[in-house]
Amino acid sequence: MKEIISSDIASSFQELKARAESRWREMFNSDKPVILVGTATCGRAAGALEVLHTLRAELRRQGLDCPVIEVGCMGHCYAEPLVVIHKPGYPAICYGFVNPVIAERLVKEFIAGDNACLEFVLGAMEENDLIPSFADFPRAGYEKKVVLRNCGHIDPTDIDHYIASGGYSALDKALRMSPEDIIDKVKTSGLRGRGGAGFATGMKWEICRQAPGKPRYLVCNADEGDPGAFMDRSILESDPHSVIEGMVIAAHAIGARHGYIYVRSEYPLAVKRVRTALRQSRKAGFLGRYILGSDFSFDIRLFKGSGAFVCGEETALIASLEGKAGIPRHRPPYPPTSGLDGKPTIVNNVKTLAAIPPIIKNGAEWFTGIGTEKTKGTAVFALAGKVVNTGLVEVPMGTTLRQVIFDVGSGIPGGKQFKAVQIGGPSGGCLPESALDLPVDFDSLTEAGAMMGSGGMVVLDEDDCMVEIARYFLEFTQRESCGKCTFCRLGTRQMLAILDDITRGQGRDEDIDTLMILAEAIRAGSLCGLGKTAPNPVLTTLRYFEDEYRAHIREGRCPSLMCRDLIAYYILPDKCERSCDACVGSCTVEAISPNRKRIKVIDQDKCVKCDTCRTACPPQYDAIVKLSPPSEVPAAAK
C-alpha cells in the first residue's frame, strides 16, 4: 500500500489551487466585464436560456469580448431569470426578471456604455454607495449560507471555480487526518442528517466504520420526491463538487472505496452537471486511485432512479441499487451494519454531505456556534406556495417559521391572510398561525405534529381548504406506496376514500373518529418511515382545523370555497353589464349564455367550476360570485 506523505498531498493540491486561483483572478480582475446568468432549472423555466443566447448574440453584434458564464440558483427564484454583471468601477449588480429585451439593453447601455439600467436592478452583490445591496434586504439578517455557500456564484461545470472558492481544501486537510479524527470532528459538530430523520451523522459513520465486513459503501441520497421540494436538485445543479468533496471525506472516514450518487431521472440537468463534475474530479485526482498522492482510493458512480417516491427511504434505495424492486425492508439490521449487498453502508442526504467540507475546513466549534442547543447548523428550505418571495432559503436552526415566511419570504401575496404551512413534505404536517413562532428544528416541529423532513415548506393562505390539502397529500403518499405493508397499502386507501367523501359533502360525523383510528393503525403497523408518517397531514389538519371538517360534514360547506362539489358560481343580474360577453367567451364548456334581457346565466349542470369566468369578469362589474354550499343561491341571482 502506498504510504501517505503529507507534503506530497499538500504539494499536489497547492498546484491545483494555484492554477484555479490564477484563472479566477485573470477573469474577475481584468478590465473586461463578466456576466453571470442563472441557468438552474428555476431559471430555465423562466426563460434564462433565451436571455443567455440574447446576451451572447448582442455581445457579438457590439464586437465586445467578455465572458458570459452559466451559474446555478442564487435562491431568489421569484425573480428569475437573474443576471449578474461584474463591471470594473461598479459593484457586482444583480438584475431580476430579465427578458431578452432587457438583456439587449444591458449589453448596449451598460456593458458598452455607462448606464447601469438601475430600473431593472434587484440588488448589488456587495456593499456600496451606488445602489441597495442584498445585505440591506430584510432576509439578509436571517440567512446564513453554509450548504448554499457557492450556489449562484460559480460555474458548476468548471472545477477551477470551485477550487478557487475554497473547494477541496477540506479534502486536502482531511487526507492528512486519521479516519477516527474526522469522525470525532463530525460528532463534535452535532451535525444531524438533513434527509428527514435527523440521526447524528458522526455516530452513524462510527457504527459503519466499526461494523465487520468489507467492502464498505457510501451512498448519496438525491432521490428528492416531495411535492414542492427542490433543495437537493438545486445544490446538484449549482454546486455538485461540494457534494463530491463531502462524499470523499465521508468515504475516507468510514473506509469506503465505492460510492454512489442516487439521483432521480426526472432531474436531467442535475444528472448532466454531476456527470461533468465526476469526470473533472477524476481528472484532477480527487477521485480514483491514490487521491492527491495519498494511499486512499475512492470512486463514485451515478445511478439514476426511476422516480419512485419510496426510494427516498434508505433500504428501498439500496434495494433499487441492487437491481431489485424499490421496497423497504425490515430494520434492524440497519444499513451502517448491513446495507448494499449485505455490507456496511452509509446513506447520507445531499445537504448532509455538502455540509461536511465547511465543518472540516472551519472546525466543529464553528459549526456548533450556529443553530440551537440540540440542533446545530442551518436548515435549507424550498419556500413555495402562497408566499411573495419563493425560492431557496438557508437559515440557522432555531429561526422561527414566522421569520422564514414573513421576513425572508416577504409574507403572503395579494393581501391574503396566512392560514397554514405544510412542512416536511407529504409525510410532514400542516401547522396553523398559532405555530408561527415555533423555532425551526427537528424536535420543536415533531412536538407540533409535523417534521423537518427534507426541507420542503409550502405556504397556504385563506383560499386553501385544509381538508382538500390533507386529501391531496394523502393521495400522493397512497399512490406512491410500495404496497408491501397492509396498513399502508389499504389503510391509506380507506383514509383517502373517507376524505373524498368529505370533500364531496358526503361525510359523516363518525368519519373523524375513523380517520383517527386508521391513522394510528397505519403509524403503528407500517414498516418504513414513509408509511408511518403518511397520516401526518390528516392528523395535523384534524388537530388544528377540525372546524373545517365539521363544516364539510354537517353543513355541506367548504369555508375556503375550494372543494368543487361544494361550490357554485352565480351571475348577479344587477351587476352584469349587458354589452359585456367576457364570461361567455371564456367558458370552455359553454355553460354561460344570455337570457332574453341579455343577462348572463350559468347552467349549473354544465359548469365545471374552473373559475375562468370569475377571472374574466371585468373588476369594475364584479358580477360573478362563488358560494358554498352550492344550493345557497344569492337573492340577487334568483
Image: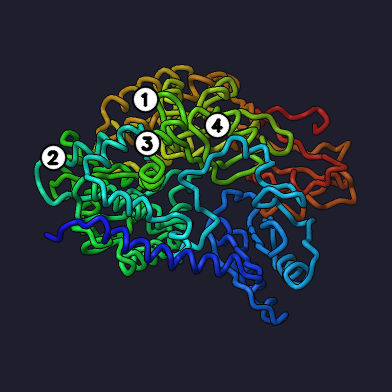
Q: Which mark is residue 421?
A: 4
- Marks 3, 1: nearer the viewer: 3
- Indicate the quadrant where residue 531 lies: top left
- Residue type at mark 2 is Ala
Q: Which residue is mark 1?
A: 519
In space, the residues marked 4 and 3 are separated at their CA atoms by 33 Å
Compare marks 2 and 3 and give the one earlier in the sequence.
Answer: 2
* Circles 3, 1 touching at the beta carbon (< 8 Å): no
| Residue 188 visible in image | yes
Q: How is the image coloured?
A: rainbow
- Marks 2, 3: nearer the viewer: 3
Give x and y (percent) for residue 580: 86, 51
> In this view, which residue lies farthest toward the front?
7
Give x and y (percent) for residue 219: 27, 50
Give x and y (percent) for residue 521: 30, 24
In space, the residues marked 1 and 4 are separated at their CA atoms by 21 Å
Q: Which mark is residue 211?
A: 2
- Indicate the quadrant where residue 399 lies: top right
Mark 4 Cα within 10 Å, few/some/many (few <14, many 20+)? Answer: many
Mark 1 Cα within 10 Å, few/some/many (few <14, many 20+)? Answer: many
Give x and y (percent) for residue 512: 45, 20
In space, the residues marked 4 and 2 are separated at their CA atoms by 41 Å
Q: Is residue 602 above or below residue 511?
A: below
In space, the residues marked 2 and 1 are separated at their CA atoms by 36 Å
- Residue type at mark 1 is Ala
Compare marks 1 and 4 and give the one earlier in the sequence.
Answer: 4
In space, the residues marked 3 and 1 are separated at their CA atoms by 41 Å
- Residue type at mark 3 is Ala
Q: Nearer the viewer, residue 396 or 232?
A: 396
- Considering the numbered disc 3 on the image, is that residue within a helix, a strand or a loop? helix
